[in-house]
Amino acid sequence: MNTTYVTTRLRAALEAATDDRLVFDLPGIEERYASLRRELPGVEVRFAMKACPLDEVLTALARRGAGFDAASPHEIAQALATGVPADRVHYGNTVKSDRNIADAHRLGIRDFATDSVEDVLAIAALAPGARVFCRLATDGGGALWGLSHKFGCTPADALRVLEAARDAGLTPAGLSVHVGSQQMTAEAWRGALARMADVIAALRLRGIHLDHVNLGGGLPALGYRDRHGRPLEPPLDKIFAVIREGMRRLRAVSPTPLDFVIEPGRHLVADHGAMRAHVSRLSTRQQGTGERRHWLYLSCGKFNGLYEMDALQYALVFPTHRGADRVPAVIAGPTCDSDDAYSHEGSPVQVPRQAASGDPVWVLSTGAYATSYTTQGFNGFRPLPHTWIRGEREALAGSGAGRAVT
């Protein structure tokens, strides 16, 4: 297994763990944040909270200077609790009820994403004087999760939306895009940035001058494997080069100075979180075709941490079976639900032949969405407690009392 993206700190914490848990390497997350700032100097980073809504992670990023992309009043309140000022938090969800808008405004939020005239009119009524940025739709090509249906509008609609914002007394402040989650191509950003340049030019003719562009999310994690078990190798250097080039073009097109914002989620946290789980059972069963198939049941699955395994093969490490003989197996979780299994037809996962109930398993690159997608206890399988590494020490959080261990 490729363990390139397991830091020494994270490996030591996994080796020391004696029960199931999620472990987050806070210094690793901070290092990834610093690297992103070096690649995109002058771009404000607003962490997409949905990727990892843990107070410890949010506080670590806030202390480094990050702001937050929040999608609900609850997330806004959680972001503000880190101590960041309200002007470093925006309401990035284009789907908002009247009550959501009023609550966000009451909390001090003045920057709202939008993609429809109806939403603009509601913001004008409930958050008077607010700033709005319009989200342009993308086709999501090249991403593992395209995000191409629910959000965003066409360039023609963006002109209508921002004109309506101006007419309603709001500030038409910016444009945003999202090229799809775990975007694997630089061309997706090239196309999105070109589309924004066209809209900025068209807005200029209407007397609307923006003050910022939101580059959205989509920056990839580095330690994932695709459904067939092949390492995903995003062209990160090329992606950053295309973004920098696109920023220069947007500044040249805009009649007024532009600031830039980006909303990374999994890029910052995925590779700096890992799960310590265990084997529930390795069994074989005859299938309807007559073929016998191995099934590896883990203590975690779709409902308590591994929701994204329909699109990914997470790297599994069996620390007590290094170098052991392996067999192909279907990976499944512990619940009594047939959806809690990932067969990856044609590309089964190789697991130790002698794996036995209770053996530890490390599931790598699970720092993104493992906590936010988990249920509250489906079938009685509770969410995993989480621990975090801060320097050379690890502290237990989540369920149970906090403690620190060396």
Image (spheres, helix red, strand yellow):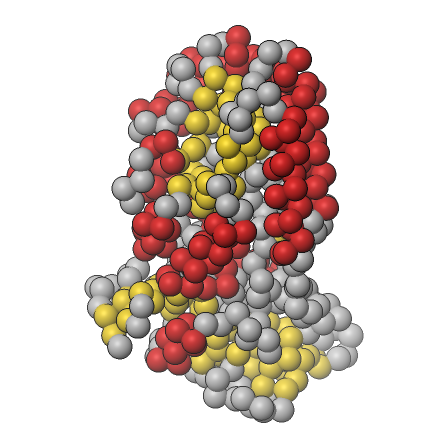
Give the residue at x 56% y 40%.
216
Give the residue at x 70% y 34%.
194
Q: With respect to residue 234, does 111 lie above or below?
A: above
Q: Position of residue 134 (x, y in %)?
A: 57, 26
Q: Is residue 227 left or right of residue 97?
A: right
Please identify the residue farthest to the right as the structure is shown. Answer: 289
Give the residue at x 61% y 37%.
247
In the foreground, 245 or 351: 245
In the foreground, 233 or 205: 205
Q: Is residue 202 left or right of residue 215?
A: right
On-image quarter of the N terminus: bottom right
- Could you say which quadrant of the image residue 248 lies in? top right
Question: Is residue 369 something that shows in the picture?
Answer: no
Q: Position of residue 256 (x, y in %)?
A: 55, 22
Q: Position of residue 368 (x, y in %)?
A: 49, 56
On-image quarter of the C terminus: bottom left
Q: With respect to residue 229, does 265 lie above or below?
A: above
Question: Is residue 391 something that shows in the picture?
Answer: yes
